Image (tube, rainbow, N blue to C red):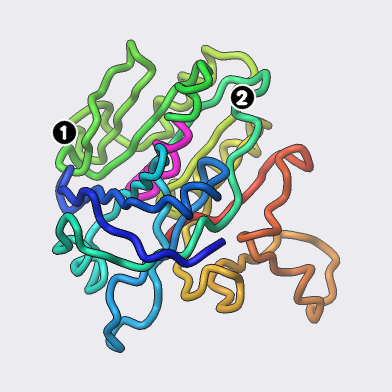
Amino acid sequence: MIIEKVNIKLNRQIADNIWEMVFDAPNIASKYVGAGQFISILANDSWGHPLRRPMSIASVKDNDISIIYKIFGDVTNILSKKNKGDSVELLGPIGNTFSNWDSDTFPILIGGGVGLAPILNLKRQCELSNVDYTIIIGARNSNEQFMKHEPHNNIYLTTDDGSIGEHGTVMAPLDQIIKNHKNPYLYACGPEPMMKAIRHYSIEKKINTQLSVESYMGCGVGLCQGCVIHNVTENLDEHTYHQKYSCLLYTSPSPRDGLLSRMPSSA
């Protein structure tokens, strides 16, 4: 993990309130390991916004690192107004990576909202390694989708209002896809309701799953506790903090250790 002052190579709107930004970041790119990692951005030097903002890495190619972000507040609005050649400060790469996607399984990639970024990154890794996969992308409406609904190419879009792709959530096509493939392995990142639904589904169906958990965090190294989640474990003393809580930045369990693995992603 390093701090690097980088230049912006591209900043463009790709859907309703959703933007893609590309950085020339050779030092961080050289330390990149794989899909699921993220960077933390210091958008400017103002005391009004002193904290970095975590953003999932959408792709890495040579020295270029790209992110996909949605305008939620002041800092993301500041980012949307940045131009080619402007500089920002990055901390990264941070976090764990997806694993086992290139093993003897069929990866089913599921993304929703801005949680789509690490899923697109994993999609690219599968393609570069000639690994067959299916991807499901959920959004509220067609204005938030920037890919095409192509079930014949194993690309499924869903929208809450049915304006593009399948009407409803990612769960409907997921259930059908599961029936058509042996040894499926789920990889997901997105809004909390979607993640909870996938978690319950994977436990019920006994399907190996890795969830990239989105979290607001101020530091990216575990000190602020923004990436800490509560462990669902029985028979623990209420004062055993380190058993009841896990920092997902560096302590995510291996998928080989159980049915469900969790890892951190951006806010």
Dot 2 amino acid type: Asp
Q: Measured along the vertical axis of the image, is residue 174 above or below residue 99? A: above
Secondary structure category for the residue under label 1: loop
Q: Earlier in the sequence, mark 2 or mark 1?
A: 2
Dot 1 amino acid type: Ser
Q: Main secondary structure of the magenta part?
A: helix
Task: Point out residue 210 in the picture as x, y percentages from the top left corner.
Answer: 60, 41
As for residue 113 lying within the magenta part, the answer is yes
For image coordinates 47% across by 19% down, the residue present is 177
Task: Point out residue 179 in the picture as x, y percentages from the top left corner.
Answer: 54, 16
User: From the viewer's perspective, is the residue at label 2 or at label 1 nearer?
Assistant: 2
For image coordinates 61% across by 60% down, the residue present is 249
Q: In the picture provided, is 68 more to the left or to the right than 99? A: left
Residue situated in front as seen by the camera: 131 or 46? 46
Q: Measured along the vertical axis of the image, is residue 172 above or below residue 219? A: above
Q: Quadrant for the C terminus, please.
A: bottom left
Q: In the picture provided, is 153 more to the left or to the right than 178? A: left
For image coordinates 39% across by 35% down, the residue present is 170
**Extent of the magenta region:** 112-123
Q: Which residue is mark 2?
A: 102
Q: Quadrant for the N terminus, please.
A: bottom right
**For the residues marked 2 and 1, what is the alpha-carbon distance in whole angstroms?**
34 Å
Q: Which residue is mark 1?
A: 163
Secondary structure category for the residue under label 2: loop
Q: In the picture provided, is 205 more to the left or to the right than 108? A: right
Residue situated in front as seen by the camera: 6 or 114? 6
Tag 2–tag 1 contact (CB < 8 Å): no
Q: Residue furthest bottom?
A: 47
- Where is residue 162, by image quadrant? top left
